[in-house]
Amino acid sequence: MSERARTQVSRRGFLAGTAAAAAATAVPAIGQAVAATPAAAAATASAGRPNILLIVTDDQPKHTDWAIQKTIGWIAGQGVKFTHGHVTTPLCAPSRSSVFSGRYAHNHGVRNNASAAALDQNTTVQRYLKQAGYRTGLFGKYLNSWKLADAPPHFEEFALLQPAYVDANWNVDGTVQTINGYTTNIIKNRTLAFLDKAATDDRPWFAYVTPYASHGPRTPEPKYAGTAVPEWNGRPSVTEDDRSDKPPYIQNATGTLADGRRIRAEQLRTLLSVDDAVQAFKDKLAALGQLENTLVIYIGDNGFGWADHGWTAKSVPYAPAHEVPFYLSWPAGGLGAGTVDDRIVANIDIAPTILDAAGISPDTPQDGSSLLTPYSRDHLLVEWWKQGTGADHNTWSSYVAKDEQYVEYYALHTDASGTVSGTGQVKFREYYDLAADPYQLTNKLHQATPAQERDLGIPALAAQLAADRTR
Protein backbone atom coordinates (compact mmCIF):
# COMPACT_ATOMS: atom_id res chain seq x y z
CA MET A 1 0.00 0.00 0.00
CA SER A 2 1.35 3.44 -0.92
CA GLU A 3 2.10 6.05 1.70
CA ARG A 4 -0.60 8.21 0.16
CA ALA A 5 -3.13 5.41 0.51
CA ARG A 6 -2.07 4.79 4.08
CA THR A 7 -2.68 8.45 4.85
CA GLN A 8 -6.19 8.15 3.39
CA VAL A 9 -6.85 5.12 5.57
CA SER A 10 -6.06 7.05 8.74
CA ARG A 11 -9.11 8.41 10.55
CA ARG A 12 -6.84 11.13 11.81
CA GLY A 13 -6.13 12.26 8.27
CA PHE A 14 -9.84 12.41 7.61
CA LEU A 15 -10.39 14.41 10.77
CA ALA A 16 -7.85 17.01 9.76
CA GLY A 17 -9.86 17.62 6.60
CA THR A 18 -13.11 18.05 8.53
CA ALA A 19 -11.85 20.02 11.54
CA ALA A 20 -13.52 23.23 10.44
CA ALA A 21 -16.91 21.59 10.10
CA ALA A 22 -16.54 19.87 13.44
CA ALA A 23 -15.59 23.11 15.13
CA ALA A 24 -18.86 24.64 13.97
CA THR A 25 -20.89 22.19 16.03
CA ALA A 26 -21.53 22.13 19.74
CA VAL A 27 -20.53 18.47 20.15
CA PRO A 28 -17.11 16.85 20.14
CA ALA A 29 -15.55 16.08 16.77
CA ILE A 30 -15.26 12.47 15.70
CA GLY A 31 -11.58 12.56 16.52
CA GLN A 32 -12.19 13.27 20.19
CA ALA A 33 -12.34 10.10 22.25
CA VAL A 34 -15.54 9.83 24.25
CA ALA A 35 -15.93 7.89 27.46
CA ALA A 36 -18.10 4.79 27.06
CA THR A 37 -20.61 5.85 29.72
CA PRO A 38 -24.32 6.71 29.51
CA ALA A 39 -23.65 10.21 30.83
CA ALA A 40 -21.20 10.88 28.03
CA ALA A 41 -23.54 9.52 25.40
CA ALA A 42 -26.00 12.41 25.51
CA ALA A 43 -23.19 14.94 25.32
CA THR A 44 -21.56 13.29 22.32
CA ALA A 45 -24.54 12.17 20.20
CA SER A 46 -23.79 13.63 16.80
CA ALA A 47 -24.67 13.05 13.19
CA GLY A 48 -20.94 13.30 12.55
CA ARG A 49 -20.26 9.91 14.07
CA PRO A 50 -20.51 7.12 11.50
CA ASN A 51 -23.16 4.48 11.45
CA ILE A 52 -21.70 0.97 11.61
CA LEU A 53 -22.86 -1.95 9.47
CA LEU A 54 -20.95 -5.13 10.36
CA ILE A 55 -21.73 -8.17 8.22
CA VAL A 56 -20.28 -11.52 9.35
CA THR A 57 -20.99 -14.58 7.23
CA ASP A 58 -20.66 -18.17 8.40
CA ASP A 59 -17.91 -20.51 7.15
CA GLN A 60 -17.22 -18.35 4.09
CA PRO A 61 -13.75 -19.04 2.65
CA LYS A 62 -11.73 -16.52 0.74
CA HIS A 63 -12.21 -17.68 -2.84
CA THR A 64 -15.94 -17.08 -3.15
CA ASP A 65 -15.94 -13.82 -5.11
CA TRP A 66 -18.19 -15.18 -7.87
CA ALA A 67 -21.18 -15.30 -5.52
CA ILE A 68 -20.84 -11.84 -3.97
CA GLN A 69 -20.18 -9.54 -6.92
CA LYS A 70 -22.59 -6.84 -5.73
CA THR A 71 -21.02 -6.93 -2.27
CA ILE A 72 -17.53 -6.59 -3.70
CA GLY A 73 -18.64 -3.87 -6.11
CA TRP A 74 -19.94 -1.80 -3.21
CA ILE A 75 -17.79 -2.45 -0.15
CA ALA A 76 -14.48 -3.23 -1.89
CA GLY A 77 -15.09 -1.21 -5.06
CA GLN A 78 -16.04 1.84 -2.99
CA GLY A 79 -13.75 1.10 -0.08
CA VAL A 80 -10.89 -1.26 0.69
CA LYS A 81 -10.22 -4.88 -0.17
CA PHE A 82 -7.84 -6.57 2.26
CA THR A 83 -5.90 -9.24 0.41
CA HIS A 84 -4.50 -10.87 3.57
CA GLY A 85 -7.61 -11.16 5.73
CA HIS A 86 -7.57 -13.80 8.48
CA VAL A 87 -9.41 -15.01 11.54
CA THR A 88 -7.34 -15.77 14.61
CA THR A 89 -9.31 -18.91 15.47
CA PRO A 90 -10.98 -20.82 12.60
CA LEU A 91 -14.11 -21.76 14.54
CA CYS A 92 -17.43 -19.90 14.82
CA ALA A 93 -17.89 -18.85 18.47
CA PRO A 94 -14.22 -18.08 19.21
CA SER A 95 -13.93 -16.04 16.02
CA ARG A 96 -17.11 -14.09 16.64
CA SER A 97 -16.00 -13.39 20.20
CA SER A 98 -12.77 -11.99 18.75
CA VAL A 99 -14.83 -9.78 16.41
CA PHE A 100 -16.78 -8.43 19.39
CA SER A 101 -13.85 -7.96 21.75
CA GLY A 102 -10.79 -7.36 19.56
CA ARG A 103 -9.02 -10.11 21.53
CA TYR A 104 -7.45 -13.45 20.86
CA ALA A 105 -9.42 -16.47 22.06
CA HIS A 106 -6.81 -17.25 24.70
CA ASN A 107 -7.63 -13.84 26.19
CA HIS A 108 -11.41 -13.65 25.79
CA GLY A 109 -11.82 -17.27 26.92
CA VAL A 110 -14.24 -18.57 24.27
CA ARG A 111 -11.94 -21.35 23.09
CA ASN A 112 -14.61 -23.60 21.59
CA ASN A 113 -18.22 -23.47 20.43
CA ALA A 114 -19.56 -24.64 23.80
CA SER A 115 -18.05 -21.83 25.87
CA ALA A 116 -19.96 -18.71 24.78
CA ALA A 117 -20.62 -17.85 28.42
CA ALA A 118 -16.90 -17.20 28.91
CA LEU A 119 -17.05 -13.95 26.94
CA ASP A 120 -16.89 -10.89 29.18
CA GLN A 121 -19.74 -8.84 27.72
CA ASN A 122 -18.17 -5.71 29.21
CA THR A 123 -15.39 -5.96 26.60
CA THR A 124 -17.60 -6.00 23.52
CA VAL A 125 -17.88 -3.37 20.83
CA GLN A 126 -21.67 -3.39 21.21
CA ARG A 127 -21.29 -2.42 24.89
CA TYR A 128 -19.12 0.53 24.01
CA LEU A 129 -21.36 1.71 21.20
CA LYS A 130 -24.62 1.40 23.12
CA GLN A 131 -23.20 3.26 26.11
CA ALA A 132 -21.89 5.97 23.79
CA GLY A 133 -25.38 6.64 22.45
CA TYR A 134 -25.60 4.29 19.47
CA ARG A 135 -28.79 2.49 18.54
CA THR A 136 -27.76 -1.18 18.36
CA GLY A 137 -29.29 -4.14 16.55
CA LEU A 138 -28.42 -7.80 15.94
CA PHE A 139 -29.97 -9.80 13.12
CA GLY A 140 -29.02 -13.44 12.63
CA LYS A 141 -26.66 -15.82 14.37
CA TYR A 142 -25.02 -14.78 17.63
CA LEU A 143 -22.79 -17.28 19.45
CA ASN A 144 -22.89 -21.07 19.40
CA SER A 145 -24.23 -22.49 22.68
CA TRP A 146 -26.00 -19.22 23.50
CA LYS A 147 -29.50 -20.03 24.79
CA LEU A 148 -32.11 -18.80 22.35
CA ALA A 149 -34.34 -17.45 25.11
CA ASP A 150 -31.57 -15.22 26.45
CA ALA A 151 -31.28 -11.72 25.07
CA PRO A 152 -27.87 -10.85 23.55
CA PRO A 153 -26.44 -8.15 25.84
CA HIS A 154 -26.16 -4.54 24.70
CA PHE A 155 -28.43 -4.90 21.67
CA GLU A 156 -31.46 -2.61 21.77
CA GLU A 157 -33.20 -4.59 19.03
CA PHE A 158 -32.53 -8.13 17.92
CA ALA A 159 -33.78 -11.04 15.88
CA LEU A 160 -31.61 -13.85 17.20
CA LEU A 161 -31.52 -16.92 14.94
CA GLN A 162 -31.35 -20.52 16.07
CA PRO A 163 -29.18 -21.54 13.10
CA ALA A 164 -31.17 -22.94 10.20
CA TYR A 165 -32.00 -21.94 6.66
CA VAL A 166 -35.77 -22.43 6.50
CA ASP A 167 -38.66 -21.94 8.98
CA ALA A 168 -36.32 -21.33 11.90
CA ASN A 169 -36.80 -20.48 15.55
CA TRP A 170 -35.96 -16.93 16.57
CA ASN A 171 -35.83 -14.71 19.61
CA VAL A 172 -37.25 -11.39 18.45
CA ASP A 173 -36.78 -8.71 21.08
CA GLY A 174 -37.40 -11.25 23.85
CA THR A 175 -40.14 -13.34 22.24
CA VAL A 176 -39.17 -16.83 21.07
CA GLN A 177 -41.12 -17.77 17.95
CA THR A 178 -40.98 -19.65 14.67
CA ILE A 179 -40.81 -17.49 11.57
CA ASN A 180 -41.49 -19.21 8.27
CA GLY A 181 -39.31 -18.45 5.30
CA TYR A 182 -35.70 -18.39 4.15
CA THR A 183 -33.61 -17.01 7.00
CA THR A 184 -31.23 -14.90 4.91
CA ASN A 185 -34.24 -12.99 3.59
CA ILE A 186 -35.72 -12.64 7.08
CA ILE A 187 -32.40 -11.22 8.29
CA LYS A 188 -32.38 -8.86 5.33
CA ASN A 189 -35.89 -7.59 6.03
CA ARG A 190 -35.31 -7.19 9.77
CA THR A 191 -32.15 -5.23 9.06
CA LEU A 192 -33.91 -3.00 6.53
CA ALA A 193 -36.60 -2.22 9.11
CA PHE A 194 -33.90 -1.31 11.62
CA LEU A 195 -32.22 0.97 9.08
CA ASP A 196 -35.55 2.60 8.22
CA LYS A 197 -35.84 3.90 11.76
CA ALA A 198 -32.95 6.23 11.01
CA ALA A 199 -35.48 8.44 9.24
CA THR A 200 -37.02 9.36 12.60
CA ASP A 201 -34.25 8.49 15.09
CA ASP A 202 -31.19 10.69 14.68
CA ARG A 203 -28.91 8.55 16.81
CA PRO A 204 -26.02 6.85 15.01
CA TRP A 205 -26.61 3.12 14.73
CA PHE A 206 -24.74 -0.18 14.83
CA ALA A 207 -26.19 -3.16 12.96
CA TYR A 208 -24.59 -6.57 13.42
CA VAL A 209 -25.86 -8.69 10.53
CA THR A 210 -24.92 -12.36 10.44
CA PRO A 211 -26.64 -14.76 8.04
CA TYR A 212 -26.23 -18.51 8.38
CA ALA A 213 -24.77 -18.80 4.88
CA SER A 214 -22.52 -20.47 3.90
CA HIS A 215 -22.56 -22.95 6.82
CA GLY A 216 -23.69 -26.55 6.32
CA PRO A 217 -26.16 -27.92 5.33
CA ARG A 218 -25.77 -25.08 2.81
CA THR A 219 -29.42 -24.98 1.74
CA PRO A 220 -29.90 -22.45 -1.07
CA GLU A 221 -32.85 -20.14 -1.51
CA PRO A 222 -35.24 -21.93 -3.92
CA LYS A 223 -34.60 -19.48 -6.75
CA TYR A 224 -30.88 -20.32 -6.60
CA ALA A 225 -31.14 -24.06 -6.02
CA GLY A 226 -30.32 -24.97 -9.60
CA THR A 227 -27.91 -22.14 -10.36
CA ALA A 228 -24.86 -23.27 -12.30
CA VAL A 229 -21.57 -22.22 -10.74
CA PRO A 230 -18.23 -21.81 -12.52
CA GLU A 231 -16.31 -25.02 -13.07
CA TRP A 232 -13.59 -25.73 -10.54
CA ASN A 233 -10.81 -28.26 -10.95
CA GLY A 234 -9.40 -27.99 -7.47
CA ARG A 235 -5.99 -26.68 -6.48
CA PRO A 236 -2.75 -28.49 -5.68
CA SER A 237 -3.70 -28.86 -2.02
CA VAL A 238 -6.84 -30.78 -3.06
CA THR A 239 -5.07 -33.23 -5.34
CA GLU A 240 -2.06 -33.67 -3.04
CA ASP A 241 -0.79 -37.23 -3.53
CA ASP A 242 1.55 -37.62 -0.56
CA ARG A 243 0.48 -36.46 2.90
CA SER A 244 3.05 -38.45 4.84
CA ASP A 245 4.61 -35.20 6.11
CA LYS A 246 1.31 -34.06 7.63
CA PRO A 247 -0.09 -34.88 11.10
CA PRO A 248 -1.94 -38.21 11.42
CA TYR A 249 -5.44 -36.74 11.26
CA ILE A 250 -4.62 -35.17 7.89
CA GLN A 251 -3.01 -38.36 6.66
CA ASN A 252 -6.30 -40.06 7.45
CA ALA A 253 -8.55 -37.39 5.92
CA THR A 254 -10.77 -38.71 3.13
CA GLY A 255 -12.12 -35.64 1.30
CA THR A 256 -11.96 -35.81 -2.49
CA LEU A 257 -12.07 -33.34 -5.35
CA ALA A 258 -15.70 -34.32 -5.88
CA ASP A 259 -16.43 -33.44 -2.24
CA GLY A 260 -14.70 -30.10 -2.63
CA ARG A 261 -16.65 -29.29 -5.79
CA ARG A 262 -19.94 -30.12 -4.09
CA ILE A 263 -19.21 -28.05 -0.96
CA ARG A 264 -17.99 -25.12 -3.04
CA ALA A 265 -21.08 -25.13 -5.27
CA GLU A 266 -23.41 -25.34 -2.28
CA GLN A 267 -21.63 -22.49 -0.51
CA LEU A 268 -21.72 -20.26 -3.57
CA ARG A 269 -25.45 -20.78 -4.03
CA THR A 270 -26.24 -19.80 -0.44
CA LEU A 271 -24.05 -16.72 -0.75
CA LEU A 272 -26.05 -15.42 -3.72
CA SER A 273 -28.85 -14.58 -1.28
CA VAL A 274 -26.37 -12.82 1.01
CA ASP A 275 -25.28 -10.75 -1.97
CA ASP A 276 -28.88 -9.76 -2.64
CA ALA A 277 -29.24 -8.70 0.99
CA VAL A 278 -26.11 -6.56 0.90
CA GLN A 279 -27.36 -4.83 -2.25
CA ALA A 280 -30.63 -4.10 -0.47
CA PHE A 281 -28.70 -2.56 2.43
CA LYS A 282 -26.81 -0.32 0.03
CA ASP A 283 -30.00 0.80 -1.67
CA LYS A 284 -31.64 1.55 1.67
CA LEU A 285 -28.67 3.58 2.91
CA ALA A 286 -28.66 5.56 -0.32
CA ALA A 287 -32.39 6.28 0.06
CA LEU A 288 -31.82 7.43 3.63
CA GLY A 289 -28.90 9.64 2.65
CA GLN A 290 -26.59 7.64 4.93
CA LEU A 291 -24.40 5.86 2.43
CA GLU A 292 -21.44 8.21 2.79
CA ASN A 293 -21.13 8.18 6.57
CA THR A 294 -21.71 4.49 7.22
CA LEU A 295 -18.69 2.35 8.03
CA VAL A 296 -19.39 -1.03 6.44
CA ILE A 297 -17.29 -4.09 7.26
CA TYR A 298 -17.74 -7.53 5.68
CA ILE A 299 -15.89 -10.64 6.86
CA GLY A 300 -16.33 -14.40 7.12
CA ASP A 301 -16.16 -15.83 10.66
CA ASN A 302 -13.77 -18.51 9.37
CA GLY A 303 -12.86 -20.22 6.15
CA PHE A 304 -13.55 -23.78 5.04
CA GLY A 305 -11.66 -26.56 3.31
CA TRP A 306 -12.77 -27.76 -0.10
CA ALA A 307 -10.95 -31.07 0.45
CA ASP A 308 -7.59 -29.32 0.77
CA HIS A 309 -5.24 -32.02 2.12
CA GLY A 310 -8.35 -34.21 2.24
CA TRP A 311 -10.03 -31.93 4.82
CA THR A 312 -13.64 -30.82 4.34
CA ALA A 313 -14.14 -28.56 7.36
CA LYS A 314 -12.47 -25.70 9.25
CA SER A 315 -10.39 -25.86 12.48
CA VAL A 316 -7.04 -26.58 10.80
CA PRO A 317 -3.94 -24.38 10.44
CA TYR A 318 -4.00 -24.44 6.63
CA ALA A 319 -4.82 -21.26 4.71
CA PRO A 320 -8.33 -22.17 3.46
CA ALA A 321 -9.52 -22.44 7.08
CA HIS A 322 -8.30 -19.07 8.37
CA GLU A 323 -8.11 -16.86 5.27
CA VAL A 324 -11.40 -15.02 4.71
CA PRO A 325 -12.92 -12.29 2.56
CA PHE A 326 -12.49 -8.94 4.31
CA TYR A 327 -13.79 -5.63 2.94
CA LEU A 328 -14.33 -2.18 4.44
CA SER A 329 -15.95 1.00 3.18
CA TRP A 330 -16.44 4.45 4.71
CA PRO A 331 -16.54 7.21 2.06
CA ALA A 332 -16.92 10.02 4.59
CA GLY A 333 -13.83 8.71 6.36
CA GLY A 334 -11.72 8.76 3.19
CA LEU A 335 -12.34 5.09 2.41
CA GLY A 336 -14.41 5.25 -0.72
CA ALA A 337 -11.96 5.07 -3.58
CA GLY A 338 -11.67 1.32 -4.13
CA THR A 339 -8.17 0.53 -2.88
CA VAL A 340 -6.31 -2.69 -2.16
CA ASP A 341 -4.57 -3.13 1.19
CA ASP A 342 -1.99 -5.90 1.51
CA ARG A 343 -1.43 -5.67 5.26
CA ILE A 344 -1.99 -8.77 7.39
CA VAL A 345 -5.35 -8.01 9.00
CA ALA A 346 -7.68 -10.07 11.15
CA ASN A 347 -10.99 -10.28 12.98
CA ILE A 348 -9.32 -8.91 16.13
CA ASP A 349 -8.90 -5.60 14.26
CA ILE A 350 -12.63 -5.04 13.76
CA ALA A 351 -13.58 -3.81 17.23
CA PRO A 352 -10.60 -1.41 17.44
CA THR A 353 -11.48 -0.06 13.99
CA ILE A 354 -15.11 0.55 14.87
CA LEU A 355 -14.26 2.23 18.16
CA ASP A 356 -11.62 4.37 16.46
CA ALA A 357 -14.15 5.53 13.87
CA ALA A 358 -16.69 6.32 16.59
CA GLY A 359 -14.16 8.20 18.69
CA ILE A 360 -14.46 5.83 21.65
CA SER A 361 -11.45 4.90 23.79
CA PRO A 362 -11.86 1.36 25.16
CA ASP A 363 -11.25 0.77 28.85
CA THR A 364 -10.65 -2.97 28.44
CA PRO A 365 -7.65 -4.58 26.70
CA GLN A 366 -7.60 -5.28 22.97
CA ASP A 367 -5.12 -7.32 20.94
CA GLY A 368 -6.04 -5.93 17.53
CA SER A 369 -5.39 -2.52 16.03
CA SER A 370 -7.50 0.00 14.16
CA LEU A 371 -7.38 -0.43 10.40
CA LEU A 372 -7.87 3.33 10.13
CA THR A 373 -4.24 3.82 11.10
CA PRO A 374 -1.06 2.82 9.24
CA TYR A 375 -0.37 0.03 11.75
CA SER A 376 1.10 -3.05 10.07
CA ARG A 377 2.07 -6.40 11.58
CA ASP A 378 4.66 -8.80 10.17
CA HIS A 379 2.86 -11.93 11.38
CA LEU A 380 -0.29 -13.11 13.10
CA LEU A 381 -1.03 -15.66 15.79
CA VAL A 382 -3.67 -18.18 14.72
CA GLU A 383 -4.84 -20.71 17.32
CA TRP A 384 -7.38 -23.49 17.84
CA TRP A 385 -8.30 -25.73 20.79
CA LYS A 386 -9.49 -29.30 20.83
CA GLN A 387 -12.71 -29.74 22.81
CA GLY A 388 -12.88 -32.92 24.88
CA THR A 389 -10.59 -35.92 24.85
CA GLY A 390 -11.99 -37.86 21.91
CA ALA A 391 -10.15 -38.90 18.80
CA ASP A 392 -9.45 -35.72 16.89
CA HIS A 393 -6.54 -33.53 15.98
CA ASN A 394 -4.74 -31.80 18.80
CA THR A 395 -4.86 -28.22 19.95
CA TRP A 396 -2.53 -26.10 17.84
CA SER A 397 -1.15 -22.60 17.40
CA SER A 398 0.62 -21.04 14.46
CA TYR A 399 2.88 -18.18 13.44
CA VAL A 400 1.47 -16.90 10.12
CA ALA A 401 3.37 -14.44 7.95
CA LYS A 402 3.01 -13.68 4.25
CA ASP A 403 5.98 -15.80 3.31
CA GLU A 404 6.11 -18.51 5.98
CA GLN A 405 4.06 -20.42 8.51
CA TYR A 406 5.11 -22.40 11.57
CA VAL A 407 2.70 -24.69 13.45
CA GLU A 408 2.86 -26.53 16.77
CA TYR A 409 0.35 -29.13 18.00
CA TYR A 410 0.02 -29.71 21.75
CA ALA A 411 -1.24 -32.27 24.22
CA LEU A 412 -3.99 -29.90 25.39
CA HIS A 413 -7.77 -29.96 25.35
CA THR A 414 -10.65 -27.87 26.65
CA ASP A 415 -13.89 -28.65 28.45
CA ALA A 416 -17.29 -27.11 27.73
CA SER A 417 -16.40 -23.98 29.71
CA GLY A 418 -13.21 -23.44 27.69
CA THR A 419 -10.89 -24.44 30.55
CA VAL A 420 -7.62 -25.91 29.28
CA SER A 421 -6.10 -29.17 30.51
CA GLY A 422 -3.13 -31.28 29.48
CA THR A 423 0.63 -31.36 29.58
CA GLY A 424 1.21 -28.91 26.77
CA GLN A 425 3.80 -31.18 25.22
CA VAL A 426 4.49 -30.41 21.57
CA LYS A 427 3.22 -33.41 19.60
CA PHE A 428 3.82 -32.35 15.99
CA ARG A 429 5.25 -29.42 14.05
CA GLU A 430 4.96 -28.03 10.55
CA TYR A 431 6.80 -25.35 8.61
CA TYR A 432 5.85 -24.05 5.16
CA ASP A 433 7.71 -21.72 2.85
CA LEU A 434 4.62 -19.90 1.59
CA ALA A 435 6.52 -17.94 -1.03
CA ALA A 436 7.62 -21.12 -2.78
CA ASP A 437 4.83 -23.40 -1.56
CA PRO A 438 1.57 -21.40 -1.16
CA TYR A 439 -0.57 -24.54 -1.06
CA GLN A 440 1.37 -25.98 1.89
CA LEU A 441 2.35 -29.22 0.21
CA THR A 442 5.78 -29.68 1.76
CA ASN A 443 6.28 -29.65 5.52
CA LYS A 444 9.96 -28.80 5.77
CA LEU A 445 10.16 -30.10 9.32
CA HIS A 446 9.34 -33.63 8.22
CA GLN A 447 12.53 -35.61 8.95
CA ALA A 448 14.52 -32.38 9.24
CA THR A 449 17.84 -32.44 11.09
CA PRO A 450 18.62 -29.96 13.88
CA ALA A 451 20.92 -28.12 11.50
CA GLN A 452 18.20 -27.85 8.89
CA GLU A 453 15.80 -26.53 11.53
CA ARG A 454 18.28 -23.86 12.50
CA ASP A 455 18.68 -22.90 8.85
CA LEU A 456 14.91 -22.47 8.61
CA GLY A 457 14.94 -20.22 11.67
CA ILE A 458 12.75 -22.57 13.70
CA PRO A 459 14.20 -21.71 17.14
CA ALA A 460 13.32 -18.03 16.69
CA LEU A 461 9.87 -18.85 15.31
CA ALA A 462 9.15 -21.19 18.21
CA ALA A 463 10.21 -18.53 20.69
CA GLN A 464 8.03 -15.92 19.02
CA LEU A 465 5.07 -18.29 18.95
CA ALA A 466 5.51 -19.02 22.66
CA ALA A 467 5.51 -15.30 23.37
CA ASP A 468 2.43 -14.67 21.22
CA ARG A 469 0.48 -17.36 23.04
CA THR A 470 0.93 -15.64 26.38
CA ARG A 471 0.56 -11.97 25.53
Image (cartoon, helix red, strand yellow):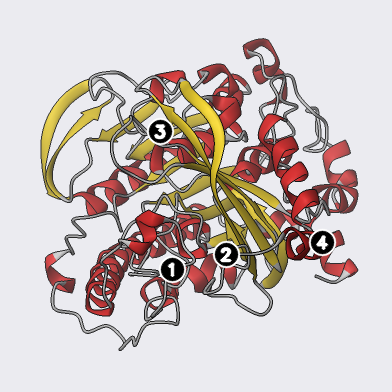
Q: Dot 2: what SS?
A: loop
**Label 1 or label 2, whichever comes before in sequence order:** 1
**Label 1 or label 4, whichever comes before in sequence order:** 4
Front label number (1 vs 4): 1
Which residue type carries mark 2? Answer: His
Which mark, residue 446? 2
Which residue type carries mark 1? Answer: Ser
Q: Dot 3: what SS?
A: loop
**Label 3 or label 1, whichever comes before in sequence order:** 3
Q: Given contact means CB atoms under 8 Å apart, are the residues at marks 1 and 2 in contact?
A: yes
**Label 2 or label 4, whichever comes before in sequence order:** 4
Mark 2 burial class by Cα count in 10 Å: few <14, some 14-19, many 20+: some
Q: Residue at x 39, y 70 (%)?
A: 308
Which mark, residue 112? 3
**Label 2 or label 3, whichever comes before in sequence order:** 3
Which mark, residue 244? 1
Residue to which mark 4 is pinned: 8
